[in-house]
Image: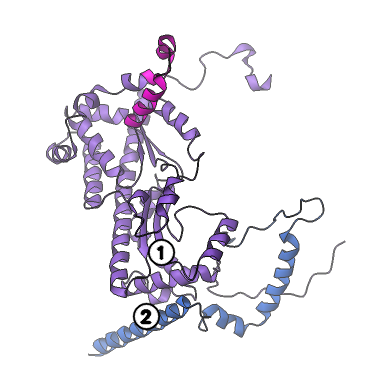
Chain colours: A blue, B purple
Amino acid sequence: MKRRKLAAATSRTIDEDAKQVHRALEEATHNHVNTNDPIMEQLKQCPEAFKVGEILGKAFDSLKYAQDGGEIGDRYLPPPGVVIPPLV
Amino acid sequence: MIGLPLDVTFPKLKGIRWRYCTRWDEGPAAVLGMSLLRLGMCRPNDWSGSAVDFVERGFRRFSSQNRAVDAKRVWVGDLRITDSLFELTEQERNQVEAEREGMTDHLYLVGDYEAAASIPIGATLARLEAEHDLLPAAFYEVLTTNLYKWMRVYDYLDAQEHAEMWMEDLSDEELEASVYRKVELEIPACIKRHSKTLKYRRARNLLREIQPHTSVARELIRHLLEMDAHGQGNEHAWPGQINEKDVPGIETWLSDAEYSRPGCLITWYENDAINACFDEEAQHMGENGPCQPNVALPIHLDKPNEELDEEVRRVFDHAGAMLRSLASAAKIVELVRDLYDEYFREHRLESGLPAEPGTAGVREEQL
């Protein structure tokens, strides 16, 4: 009896999760900003991450284009969209 | 100058994605993602906040369930979901996106090979012939018919075509010395005798009926019949089958493109005349435009949910069959290579090492 109740509850949770994801995907089709992005949630809880991101962004910007000795327009970083495997 | 260390710590964010996509990518992926979720191929816990990630996680699981790992042991290439049939540079992509009004209404499942897998089949055919006179031709016919479902196959027929074209301009003396003449001469008798008359259906029936004595022949036939079963009901999804009505502009795209790169090269033995013809052709592949992908199936995103789900299921069924079939084919190719190596060890013609050292025993490049 208890097991049956548990199964029903699990199934309901899965359905609810699926509906929630379906709604988020629906929003994405209209180019809406996703407010339930778990990464955004984590960033909200850890605002220092923004500061780190900003510093890293500036460091990368300085590398983005050729410095002394390089040809103008040479990229030092890959273009957006390129997938780089994470360092383990 | 060495500066003082910055007072910065790197916070660790759990589950962070390593890829972020533009809105151009997210919209179509979200439509496909909803369909995959309805079909049960994606799960709610695949959601990380990005539609592209969501689809990718579902697609990875799907590929792994359909033995992609086994297939990858032999086939060098990829199966991808993309919004373009050809690879674009960043600039070309930006131009396409700028010209497009709204979201793309098509995605494609594209299958392509970066290199042709070598299948030196001569030794295997000799082994099969010892079992039954018709077995080599039956095996060859069923194997190539099934490989053709998923890729362009380069074999002695392509080499013959290439050789005939070049032999037209050769003098008798040149012909005598040329490799082109060898293409015809090197075809094993067991294939030459029966290739015209032994067609796929009869060949498959023969494979089912013949009971080989050796375990390696039994293994080869078992994997081949397994491969054949996975491919049943599927035909090669060449990009040329996509019609202009379904995907406007496809005919222009395809007319500017070259024929697909082969996914495999079937030779009698390595560095034979087929190999030589292939090498000549491969040098010029892709010179006059991008090569068409080997497999391309469109997914029309602008359909009502039910129709979209049906199409997505059909496309993924095709992809699943392809992966499972290629996984079985990989086992066959590994056995074929083992038999070739075994034959090579027993009948070594060129050892790869000179019997006597060259002049002064010094390698040429060091002089």
Residue A49 is one of the magenta-drawn residues: no
Does residue B261 appear to the left or right of B364 in the view shown? Answer: left
Location of residue B135 by image quarter: top left
Q: Amino acid at mark 1?
A: His
Residue drawn at the location 73% of the way across and 55% of the way down: A73
Q: Position of residue B307 (x, y in %)?
A: 29, 70
Q: Position of residue B176 (x, y in %)?
A: 40, 12
Name the main secondary structure of what is drawn in magenta. helix
Query: Compared to B85, does B148 lie above or below?
Result: above
Q: Position of residue B32 (x, y in %)?
A: 39, 69
Residue sitting farthest toward the right: B1
Q: Mark 1 falls within which chain?
A: B
- Say which of B340 and B172 sits in front: B172
Q: Amino acid at mark 2?
A: Ala
Which residue is labeled 1 in the image? B106
What is the span of residues highlighted in magenta in the rendered image? B156-181
Q: Secondary structure at mark 1?
A: strand
Q: Residues within 10 Å of mark 2 (few under 14, many from 20)?
A: many
Is residue A83 among what the camera can see? Answer: no
Q: Position of residue B163 (x, y in %)?
A: 38, 24
The CA span between labels 2 and 1 is 24 Å
State if disc 1 and disc 2 touch (CB < 8 Å).
no
Is residue A60 among what the camera can see? Answer: yes
- Say which of B165 and A23 sits in front: B165
